């Protein structure tokens, strides 16, 4: 299990200057590498009369079945059935072919190297001649090229945009096992960054359990420096408790009026960090101040920094509040049940409506945009991630249930009817069950998990005021009914497999 741990770095003045200098060098290095690739492509396609059209690619091996010259790294000047000239040393890669049985080297093959391979070698040469490059750690420069390669992969394979020249770089990366931790004390520790030195940071975690660090990213955010370590926690986390040993379950329904409604009837308020009236006004004021300033002026830069600081502050506030909410939720019960939301789809912009005459009808786009902003501000996905992590740390399972009709279904009788709900009120027309609509939704989620074993029929989970929990052992009969019901109704629920197993074991035990 790999997770990221973030700490705030406390560099001294000279270290901060070095970090900033590195970022400038790395930005130029990346732009240089990108320009080289673009030029290679243009150079090879300058002859419009030839039948060969070069395409961007990451490799062009002579052994592969790709038609020679149709794919090129920088792109390299490979000619159809061409022979690698001897002075193309940097553009080639030698691979050793080993015998499968004896594992001895039989032959050495020469292939065209990948684009990143060539550029990494060029970077090594640059380090010998250019002072700026000598100062920067070699591994950091190499991972800078690797990041550019990833940007190209994202363009070709993942549907992202074409890599652009960047005006500002805010982070760089160390390869695994480069950064070492030293002087680990209770409140602070030091990170040894090769090429920069020991930088102190506030320690808020148990760093003693770490075997070694994976990749480490150094970031600049809102005028502060942070280190983000990828750490391997396999073995130091408890096992996840099996569902049948859990004695309580809490369902959560995320929303906008109330950030989270818990199935025990309590709520977590939505503070709306960036969309409440006060901060929204302040942000728009800061934004307006920027647009009023003269282009490329020092005052404009100052104004931009002021806005960035404000945004950073708000992001930190939201982060802290999300931790608070996640902590409250995970501490409530043994199992956390939540909806399986597609948040990305929920904040898509409104589709345009054509009126059939070449124009557009009203589609409520501005209202939808405002709603999207509020949804994004609530940070539901962030809360879900934090719940997952806290649950993992304490060995508690998290169950996702389908979200469809969770706000309309009655948790008591299962009736789905739009008229049951009116604003914040919920009144079931079948069984006259009344409740706050959000609390009800969270109880519906609990019902969908199919894990609640109430102590008697009068206090169904939907009715009980405080907590929806009860003992598992005294309720085997109820459990059986509930499990069978869930299996028979064929709920599309991740726990159905578990329920089916449990139903079978219960059948066996009752027949004995
Ligand atoms: Zn009902």
Image (cartoon, grey):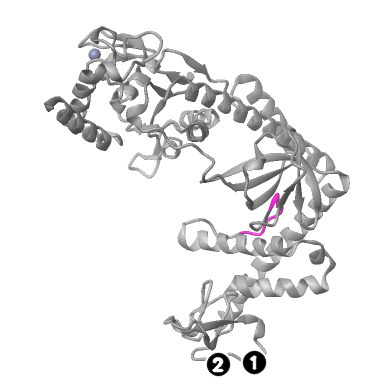
Few, some or many residues within 10 Å of mark 1 (<14, 14–19, 20+):
few
Residue 362 covered by magenta stretch: no
Q: Which residue is mark 1?
A: 86
Residue at 65% over, 24% down = 279
Tag 2 secondary structure = loop
Q: In the displayed structure, does residue 209 sit left or right of residue 425?
A: right
Can residue 411 be seen from the camera position used here? no
Can residue 99 be seen from the camera position used here? yes
Q: Horizontal and vertical percent for residue 223?
A: 76, 40
**Most prominent secondary structure in the magenta stretch?**
loop
In the image, residue 50 sits, relative to residue 139, either above or below, namely below
Tag 1 secondary structure = loop
Looking at the picture, tell me which residue is in the foreground, 474 or 135.
474
Residue at 55% over, 63% down = 152
Q: In the displayed structure, does residue 22 sit left or right of residue 158?
A: right
Residue extending furthest toward the left: 511
Q: In the displayed structure, does residue 213 sit left or right of residue 391?
A: right
Residue extending furthest toward the front: 512
Q: Which mark is residue 83?
A: 2
Looking at the picture, tell me which residue is in the foreground, 299 or 342.
342
Q: Horizontal and vertical percent for residue 461?
A: 32, 14
Residue at 64% over, 92% down = 86
Looking at the picture, tell me which residue is in the foreground, 478 or 324.
478
In the image, residue 328 sits, relative to residue 294, either above or below, namely above
Q: Which residues are magenta?
A: 164-172
Q: Using the rendered view, name the quadrant where residue 286 is placed.
A: top right
Q: Horizontal and vertical percent for residue 117?
A: 61, 73
Looking at the figure, which quarter contains the C terminus? top left
Q: Horizontal and vertical percent for residue 319?
A: 60, 31
């Amino acid at each position: 299990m790999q997770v990221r741990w973030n700490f705030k770095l406390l560099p001294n003045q000279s270290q901060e200057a070095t970090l900033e200098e590195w970022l400038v060098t790395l930005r130029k290095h990346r732009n240089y590498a990108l320009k080289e690739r673009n030029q290679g492509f243009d150079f090879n396609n300058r002859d419009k009369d030839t039948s060969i059209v070069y395409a961007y690619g990451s490799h062009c091996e002579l052994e592969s079945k790709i038609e020679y010259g149709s794919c090129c790294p920088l792109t390299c000047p490979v000619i159809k059935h061409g022979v690698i000239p001897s002075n193309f040393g940097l553009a080639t890669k030698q691979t050793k072919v080993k015998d499968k049985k004896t594992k001895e080297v039989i032959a050495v093959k020469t292939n065209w190297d990948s684009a990143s391979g060539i550029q990494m070698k060029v970077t090594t040469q640059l380090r010998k001649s250019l002072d700026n490059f000598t100062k920067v750690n070699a591994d950091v420069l190499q991972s800078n090229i690797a990041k550019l390669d990833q940007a190209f992969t994202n363009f070709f394979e993942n549907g992202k945009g074409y890599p652009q020249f960047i005006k500002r770089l805010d982070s760089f990366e160390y390869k695994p096992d480069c950064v070492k931790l030293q002087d680990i004390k209770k409140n602070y520790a030091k990170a040894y960054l090769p090429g920069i030195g020991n930088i102190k940071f506030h320690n808020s975690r148990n760093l003693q359990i770490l075997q070694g660090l994976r990749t480490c990213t150094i970031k600049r955010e809102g005028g502060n420096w942070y280190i983000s370590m990828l750490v391997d926690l396999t073995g130091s986390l408890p096992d996840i408790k099996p569902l049948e040993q859990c004695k309580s379950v809490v369902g959560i329904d995320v929303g906008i009026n109330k950030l989270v409604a818990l199935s025990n009837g309590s709520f977590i308020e939505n503070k709306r960090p960036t969309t409440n009236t006060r901060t929204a006004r302040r942000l728009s004021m800061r934004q307006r101040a920027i647009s009023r300033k003269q282009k490329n002026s020092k005052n404009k830069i100052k104004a931009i920094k002021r806005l960035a600081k404000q945004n950073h502050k708000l992001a930190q506030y939201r982060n802290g509040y999300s931790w608070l909410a996640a902590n409250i939720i995970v501490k409530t019960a043994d199992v956390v049940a939540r909806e399986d939301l597609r948040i990305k789809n929920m904040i898509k912009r409104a589709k345009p409506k054509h009126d059939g005459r070449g124009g557009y009808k009203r589609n409520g786009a501005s209202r939808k945009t405002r709603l999207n902003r509020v949804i994004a501000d609530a940070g539901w996905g962030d809360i879900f991630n934090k719940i997952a992590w806290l649950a993992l740390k304490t060995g508690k399972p998290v169950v996702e249930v389908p979200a469809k009709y969770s706000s309309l279904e009655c948790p008591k009788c299962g009736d789905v009817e739009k008229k049951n709900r009116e604003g914040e009120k919920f009144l079931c027309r079948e069984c006259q069950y009344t409740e706050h609509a959000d609390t009800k939704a969270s109880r519906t989620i609990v019902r969908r998990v199919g894990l609640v074993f109430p102590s008697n029929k009068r206090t169904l989970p939907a009715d009980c005021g405080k907590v929806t929990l009860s003992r598992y052992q005294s309720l085997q009969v109820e459990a059986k009914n509930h499990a069978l019901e869930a299996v028979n109704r064929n709920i599309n629920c991740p726990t159905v497999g578990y329920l089916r197993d449990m139903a079978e074991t219960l059948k066996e035990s009752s027949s004995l």
